[in-house]
Each structure stands twice: as C-alpha cells, then as structure tokens.
Image (cartoon, rainbow, N blue to C red):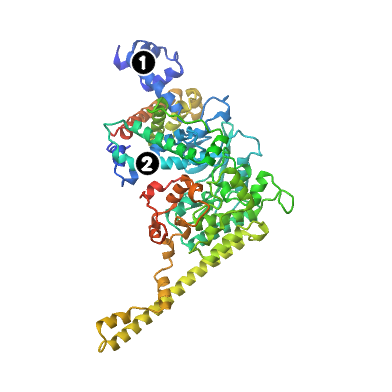
Amino acid sequence: MDRSSCLDDAQLLALIEQPQGEPAAALHLDGCADCQDRLARVREDLALLRDTGPVRRNPTADVTTVPVAEAKHGLPNAIGPYLVLEWLGRGGEADVFRAEHPVLRHNVALKWSRRPFQGTAEPLVEEGRTLAALDVEGVARVFDLGLHEGRPYLVMQMLRGRTLHHYAAEAPLSHREMARLIARVARILARAHAQQVWHRDLKPSNIVIDGEGNPTIIDFGMAGFSQPWRDDAPCSGGTLHFMAPEQAKQLLGLCDERTGAVPVVGPRSDIFALGAVLYSLLTEHAPFPRSEDSAALIDRVCRGDFDRRRLAARGLPRRLVTICLRAMAYDPADRYASADAMAHDLERFARSTRRNSWLATAGALVLVTAGIALMLMRHGEDLSNASPKDTAVESVPPSPGTEAVEISAVQPPDAERTEPPTEAAPETGSEMLTGDDESEHTRRSRHLFKGRGNDSSAKSEAKPKPRRWIPHWLREWGK
Amino acid sequence: MDSTRTSLLRDVQDPRNSQRWMEFKAVYEPMITAFVRKQQVPWHEVDELVQQVFIKLWEGIASYRRGEARFHVWLYQVVRHAVYDWHRRQNKDLRLREAAREQGRSAPVVLPEEPDAEWEHDFRRRVFECALASVRPEIEPATWACFEQHVVLARPAAEVARELGRNVNAVYTSASRVLGKVRLACRRLTEEWRDGS
C-alpha cells in the first residue's frame, strides 16, 4: 500500500459520515490497516467529544430527560448561538453558564431552563420580562431571550465579583461596612419596589459585590416559582433560611392566624429577607439554620422564630441590632415601611459610627497627651527625694477614665474590621447549635466561613478550639 | 498550551502552590461533583462534601507516592472514603437518618474498592472538555464553528456548510484540523495531570 496516498483526518471524517461518498478513499481504506486504525481512533474521539455535554442532536429526544444532574459534569457546547464556556451554578429552575456571543465575543451569563418551554407564562420568560422592564442600577441587565432544544434561555449581564456570602467570608466586614453595604442593597431594592417588583428570594448568594464594592442583586423573580422547602425541589439551598414568615405561609397555602386569609407577599417580605441578610453578616449564621430538619425548619420560618440570642452577643452594636430586628419583625406592619426607610437608618448608623470613631480618637489623644504631661511633671518633682521603687509605683496607674478611652483610642476606625463579629466565636452559650444539634456540616461551614483576619479572635474566645490551618485559596469556593 | 509546564500533580504536592492547586481543582472538581451526586448525597450537601474532599486531598496529596498507586486510583480512594464518612455521620444522627429514609435514600451506598470503568470514562471525558477549552482560543471562529457543529454536535457537514456559507470539504478540513489540535491537547493534559510524567 502506498503510504503517500493514506487518508487524512478530513477524508476520514467524510468517510465516517458517508462511507461510500468517495469511492477512491473507501477503496484505499479497505486495503490499508493504518487507515483503518486511524479511522477507529477518530470514531472513538468523536464518541467522547459528543459525550462531553448534555446537548444532543436528536431533535426527537425528550428534553425532560436531558441529564440535568450532570450539567456540571459535561457542559453543553453551545446554547442557541452562544458558546458555553463554564458552568456557574444552579438556580431554582435553571442552570447558569458563562457564555460568549460568537460574533461580539463578549461574556454573558446564560440561564438555561431545565424545563420545556411552557409558553409565555414560563417563569424564565417572566423573569426576563421583569428584568427588561426594570431600569434599575444594581440589578443585572437582560440582553436576550431564546429557545434551545425546546427549553428557554435568558442572556444576562455577566457580573464580575463575588457573592456576599463569599465576600464576607474572605475578610470580615466592620459593622459600619455592613451597614453601608446593606443600605446600598436596600436602595436598589427600593428602586425595584417602586416599579412594583419584589425580589422574593433575597439572600447573601443573590447579592454580588464587584471589585469596587458595589452590590448588584441577581435572581429576580426566582422564589415565586419554586418550592424551596422540599429537598428535591430544583432550587438553590438556603432560600428558606432567609424567608419572611408570610412568604413561607403563602407558599404552603397556610392562612394568617389573625386575618384568616392566605398572607400576601409584598415589599416588606423583601425587607425581612434583607434584615435576615444583615443578621447573617452580624452573626455568621442564617436566621433559620440549615441543620434543622425540613418540618421543624418550616415551622420555625412560619413562626418567624429565629435565634434572637445571637444578636444579644457582646460586641454587636445595639443600634444595628435594632435595625435588624425591626426589619425582621414577625408582623409585616412592624417592619420598615420601605426599603428606603431601612437604608436611611443604616446610613445614619454608618455615619454616626464614623463620627464616634473620630471623636473617640481625638478625645483619647487629648487625654493621653495630658496624662503623659502630668506624669512627666510629677516625675520631675519626685526625682530629687523619692526612691526608685516609689517612682515605679507612682507612675504606673492611669485613671480609670483614661484607661477606658485608651482602649478605644488604639482602635482606629478600621480596627473594627479585624475584630471578629462576636458570634463568630464558637459559642458556649448557644443552645441552638450545640452538641447533637450541630451537624458536622454546620461546624465545617462555620470553620470555613472564618477568614484569615479572624485569627485575632482566638484570643478573645472563651473556649478556643484547635483549628486546622487551611489556606484561604482552598477555602474560597468561587462560584 | 505551554509545553514546558511541569507536572500538575508534582506541583500541587507543594502546599503553597495555590495557582496550580486551583488548576488541579478546576480539573477534578466536575468529575468529583458528578460522582458525589450519584452517591445518595442530597443536592444541597454536594458542594460541602466536595469541598471536604478537596481539603482532604490538599492535606494528603504531599504523601502520595507515584510508585505506590496510580493517581486516579488514589484520588478515587480519597473520594470514596469521604463519601463513606459522610454517610456514616448521617447514620449516626437519628433525625438525619429519618430524613434520609423519607427521601428514599436509606439503601446503603456500596462503592467498588477500585475505580470502575465509569470513573475512567469520566476522566477521559474531562480531559476532552479541558482540551476543547484550551484549544478554542487559538482557533478562528469560523473554523471552530465547523468543528463544533460537525464534530461535537454531529450535524451533517452539508448542512453546516450551507449554514456557514462554505463548501463541504472546507467543513471536513476545518473540523479535522481542530480535532488534531484537540487530540494533541488531550495527550498533553493526560500526561500532565494523571501520573506526573
């Protein structure tokens, strides 16, 4: 066999598709063992390449049988005209991918429903419409809506940043930073509410913080279409853990004990969820912890029975706790009337904390200077007639007031950042998540939630735990 | 792809090499996640368990010796133990056991001691995925479109040619050119990832 006439890969591809398409090539193949081997390898490669994603060519395939559970395992290569680059995560009804427009070459977030298209009442379509109508800074923009393999997809702005959950885990936020951040989210929420849009699924993983610290709210309209208390429900975890009581009741079809009617979800349900997000920042725990079994958890959410003792921990600013508790009031009427009102209180807290820090610093400086001057004067007077031992005793004790101010003076405004939220320490007094009630999962989450900056907290913990050192880049779970 | 890169496996045995560790995680996370999902672990626990696996890998990879076991066999053992540990913890807790029973997850999970053909296949598939991703930036969009439509999506060359305004032979040629690059990338990745050669 003349090797120079051996088939190239292009000819092999053609032969695989049309075995008798090119008689000369087919004839050569019959007599060439090398080409037959290569053909077998190409076939094998094709089989693997075609197996790399759930996208199937067969138009008769039942779209509901697409192996969604393997979405992270094998990416589809393209959805509509968009080239899929990466699987980002799962939403309530859809998988989310980083994708690229084939011509414009810009990155987008593409949300592809796991259900067949059901007409214009389709949740993803409704979400697309809602977002397209929402002209609010701080909410991800929508670019396109399409249908691929019988399932709708939504193309949205690709956000660069980290979810609030990861952002807070990387470096603990000071209370002022928390207040400012939540205030900004509240302002975004207020603008959405002004356009009659409630989020209904606000939680730390639905708030993305970019490199400049600007928050963006994602996943608008998800919660209304899912049943998050069910373990098998296709929705992201944690939703129920931030949910307002009336929303849980509405989803369950339960009536309000006072009105006798199924409660209505409105903007104040979002305010509750935002309060819950603040709670999670202050305490490093979701208000309704995930270690609960489903029935107990639903019961607690419906009663608005979150662990208030965590907010009573030492070191949490009372005013911020008050804001949190007001936002998370059981009765919607007792909550803030608007997200703007909540933002206003949070901003006022942030401003006053800053002012207080400066005043404390200035006051401390004055007192320290005065103390040193006084000490030097007395030291000068005593030098001639006092023994060295007397001098040492005389010069040591500062006044109680000075001591108190000095402690705050050595805390610059940013010192608060490295101070761990008091609840971050393993709590000996917490009854809710101790002993058998605390799952390994929760312990792990809490362990991993702590950033490197928390090392100083070990000194102040009443019961320090031996802790494995794990580098931060291993802890970061960057979805 | 940089042909001078050293073995990924050897690099991640240095616990300070965070960059290579992230590459290692990107390579193996999808297949470990898919594996864990099949082992009666509820979806909301999967990510946590996968993270625990990676912490175990990070802690233990320095002690992996190439001569003792092939890496993917060793990796499988780590994942298998993590899955068993998870189920053991669940079984200790009465409430969790009850919840698992209610969700139809009460049958004991039994995993073979050695990785089976599915694990092997998953690895090969992962190699192809990463090879595709690594090759793609080097390829002209039109050439890539021929490859993707004809080879990956298995569409008839004539149909692709018509859609892209090219002749059929050009589709075969473009597709085969990319296929060659993908194969080359696969070989490199396999060598780099698996046995540290």
Secondary structure, mark 1, is helix
Cα separation, mark 1 vs mark 2, equals: 45 Å
Under mark 2, the amino acid is Lys
**Residue A132 seen in this snapshot:** no
Q: Nearer the viewer, residue A182 or B44?
A: B44
Q: Residues within 10 Å of mark 1 (few under 14, many from 20)?
A: some
Instruction: Give coordinates of residue B160: x percent, y percent.
Output: 49, 26
In this image, A240 relative to A450: left or right? Answer: right
Instruction: Give coordinates of residue B6: x percent, y percent.
Output: 28, 38
Q: Nearer the viewer, residue A112 or A279?
A: A279
> Relative to B19, is A191 above or below?
below
Q: Residue at x 58, y 64 (%)?
A: A344
Which mark, by number, is residue A163? none
In this image, A345 relative to A369: left or right? Answer: right
Quarter of the image where one finds residue A224: top right
> Relative to A338, is A263 above or below?
above
Which mark, by number, is residue A36? 1
In this image, A288 relative to A443: left or right? Answer: right
